[in-house]
Image (cartoon, helix red, strand yellow):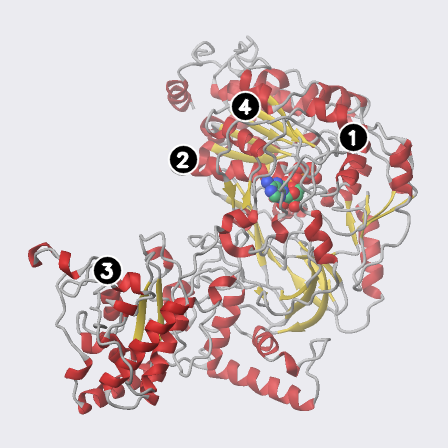
Amino acid sequence: MPAGLNYSSAFSAATRKYFATTTCGKQFRFHGWQAITNARSPYSSIADAMLKRAVVKSADQPPTSRPALEKQLFPSSSGSQNGNIEEGFKNSRQPTSSIGGFTNYRNSANPSSQINPKSTATKPLRARSPNIGQKPRSNTASTVGSAITKNGSVFSRADSFQEIQNSSIESQDALATTNPGIDLRSAAPYLENDFDDDDFDLEFESNAVPPMSAPPRPVSQKKPADSPGYNLPQGPRTTSRTPMAHAPSSSAVTWPSSSPSHRRTPPGVKRQREVIQSAELPSAGIDPSMRPSKRRNLPWVNKRAEEDGIPAGDEESDAIVDLTQDSSTSTQICMHCRGSHPSSKCPKPSKWNHTPKEKKLPWNNTGSAVREEKLKFKEMQKARKIDPAQQAIINSHQKSTMKMAPISLSQEQQRVLDLVVNQSKSVFFTGSAGTGKSVLMRAIIAELRKKYRKESDRVAVTASTGLAACNVGGVTLHSFGGIGLGKEDVPTLVKKIRRNPKAKNRWIKTKILVIDEISMVDGDLFDKLEGIARLMRNNGRPFGGIQLVITGDFFQLPPVPDSDNKARGIKFAFDAGTWSTAIHHTIGLTEVFRQKDPVFANMLNEMRLGKITDSTVAAFKKLNRKPNFEDSLEATELFPMRHEVENSNAYRMRSLVGRSYRYDAVDTGTVTDQNMRDKLLSNMMAPKTIELKKGAQVMLIKNMDEGLVNGSLGKVIAFMSEVTFEIYDKNPELFGDDAEPVDEEARKATQKTSLTAKFASNKDANPNTGREYPLVQFSLADGTERSLLVMPEEWKIELPSGEVQAQRTQLPLILAWALSIHKAQGQTLERVKIDLKRIFENGQAYVALSRAVSQEGLEVHNFDKSKVMAHPRVAQFYNSLYSVNKAMEHPRVTGAAYSKPVTKSEKPAKKSKSNEWDDFDADEELMAAYG
Ligand SMILES: Nc1ncnc2c1ncn2[C@@H]1O[C@H](COP(=O)(O)OP(=O)(O)OP(=O)(O)O)[C@@H](O)[C@H]1O
């Protein structure tokens, strides 16, 4: 059938919703009711005109194919490099350009193109639409853009890996907020995920109130991460569901998380609109060869009709019209059964997989029937109308649906992941700052959790400090082990653990132990844990047979020696007697992602190794100047001591005039002892209390989307409620640069709309309580600015069993004029200031300076070679590292095939099973029985 037009469609389109089916099975739905209001008779003429227009348009506009979005994000990073860190260190003075094609994920052309449609993570923050509030500041974007293609590695390598596997993580997952209660998603009649069809891509649905000028925007699936009792100035928020959760299915709540490109009207839909408009034209010049296509009775159409209270199969009521996108598709729709095949090839009716509907053609309708239909349609629309306040809430939620684009792992990262997840090796992977250790670790955790999704307590995620544990969604090693401060000897600690059923169970159940930021784990503690593991599991293998996944960089912050061991000096985890037996592979990651400039990356690497050349000293000394930023944001100053940070931030706050807004965290969790919980939460990035004023410099401490990430710097420009933010967002002309109404008239208009919205809404269902949150203008890495109404988020300290020991709900912001080096570890910062005069510890200077992404954003005072200290034992240890390639060639290079006997004194009363390490599961069963 030419042009894909259906006469029946043409008629029905004039009164109801439409479906369009593309060749690849994509569905577009929209309302075409405007056409009927303007349509002139006769219907056949309308249809004919539409048909004609459709022919013309489809000839004019060949279907566009969607680009492979994932290819735009992370082209392969380092196909031709080896992973030999030794080599890398040797070559560290010769900057190379070996990372061709590396793309910074922050600058990806289509940032949200890899949104995981199945993710239910909620972002309660109100990100202004990506198209709003983005003011190109300068041409820095292009500088960054060009820089990203440069080599990020300081090492030259041969091909590290033979094959590339696809592996990616959603950074978002690790950071997702899980706030039950509101599920706006349920208001949607159906979601993209409800369909098996992988190609299903878009769906349009009009706003309930015509005329529709633009397709509706995405809607978040959950309410903001506000818990009941959240102690903010305006009182607690409710967690009840919004009315939209029960709204009629045709409410403007259709778009699941979707790429911004989805907000553009697809070409096919444009054509269809034009077809409808052409119904006004006289029917001259119609190609007589055109025949109406048949409507397909799609399963979801029936479902939708049912939800709308329309009898399924009632064509009169369900008003679904096939508008095919191009002629090639339309010719495939069968006249008889409406299957996707030519009519001539239609099988016998007995083989049809659905009941064909009664053929209803527009010219069969009488005038009164049409009027009746129109009336029905109007009533339906009326019933579906939602009040403006609800719409505002929906819109505000829509703004928060931006998701993190997944990061594609590099080849060497992927290879490590494979060693851990598929080959179950005990691995220690390390690398200089910015080589993606944290990213890889999050990917590994995600994969392991997927692998053990039915036995979540098999994977224990831990870190050396509370802060590091929070970053990976785990607990501290001490907490996991149930060892308290862990000062006692192994037998005493084992007794202690046996008295604690939860801790005992953890030791028995754990199959994989993840340890992040190993550089701060004391060597003695590592040995003790190893001994405990063997005893608790009654298994003589290293770590009692537990697979270890460890990461960190020993050139960064060392363990804090406790008062008893001060004389002993630092004992690193690699100094532990059991280190080499417990780990199968020690791997150095070589590709630097944080610093795109290889010269800068090399300067940092020299510093890391403590082998700093004169030219590097000179280059660092040149950074003793004030960088010229084009906005009012200053570099974050890093201090070694916490009190220095507090003093600096407090001083800057005091210098600001205006009202101060205080936001107290809401802390919950299974640990009910207040002191204990406070202690657990004390190391969290999110502060217990944050006081803000207009003009305060703040840092985002959670990833919001691909642009607004952990470490983004911004300034508070206003405090406003969600409703006011909606007005601000939609009517920027009413507000000045300071986010205040431009004049009295604008102020009145804003107030009136806010009040109407507040009172018109259902109090229980409307989360807009009028509470004011900070509106922050962030400066993004690409040189643009974005405003965000920052709402509370959640952080958890979670045991492997899923038990949430402690949880904090707080704004994801910290004051950012100053930051401690300890808190900065793991961060990526655009602007950093450091005075090396204050440095007193190995690794501190390296951690501080290596937070910066570029020399342009780094300000260094009092650079002194002697302050840039690397511990000699650390340097020696790193000389022994080898590449992933080597690890693959020699499966057990560091001697993991080792079964350490349980010593007599350590031996538990029950029979030892130290020689049964091949029969892991049987071993575990026995252990469980033993426990
Ligand atoms: N495969 C990748 N593709 C793109 N960007 C990446 C990749 N891996 C890491 N990055 C980016 O590089 C930066 C540094 O990553 P990450 O924090 O994981 O490094 P790190 O080795 O843990 O650093 P540090 O030791 O300083 O904590 C981050 O901005 C991260 O998003």
Q: Quadrant of residue 192?
A: bottom left
The residue at which mark 2 appears reads as: 455
User: Residue 13: horizontal and vertical position, in percent?
Assistant: 29, 78
Looking at the rendered structure, the kind of residue marked 4 is Ser
Q: Nearer the viewer, residue 912 or 358?
A: 358
Are there few (<14), some (14-19), or many (20+) residues within 10 Å of tag 4?
A: many
Disc 3 secondary structure class: loop
The residue at which mark 4 appears reads as: 426
Report the Cα–Cα distance between label 1 and label 3.
62 Å
Looking at the rendered structure, the kind of residue marked 3 is Gln
Q: Is residue 3 visible?
A: yes
User: Residue 210: horizontal and vertical position, in percent?
Assistant: 40, 83
Disc 2 secondary structure class: loop
The residue at which mark 3 appears reads as: 332
Are there few (<14), some (14-19), or many (20+) residues within 10 Å of tag 3?
A: some
For discs 4 and 1, the disc positioned in front in the rendered view:
1
Looking at the rendered structure, the kind of residue marked 1 is Gln
Report the Cα–Cα distance between label 4 and label 1.
33 Å
Are there few (<14), some (14-19), or many (20+) residues within 10 Å of tag 1?
A: some
Nearer the N terminus, badge 2 or badge 1?
A: 1
The residue at which mark 1 appears reads as: 94
Disc 1 CB within 8 Å of nearest ligand 1 atom = no
Position of residue 312 relative to residue 804, above or below, is below
State yes or no: discs 4 and 1 in contact (Cβ < 8 Å).
no
Report the Cα–Cα distance between label 2 and label 1.
48 Å
For discs 1 and 3, the disc positioned in front in the rendered view:
3
Q: Is residue 842 visible?
A: no
Looking at the rendered structure, the kind of residue marked 2 is Glu
Report ligand 1 position as a quadrant: top right
Nearer the N terminus, badge 2 or badge 3?
A: 3
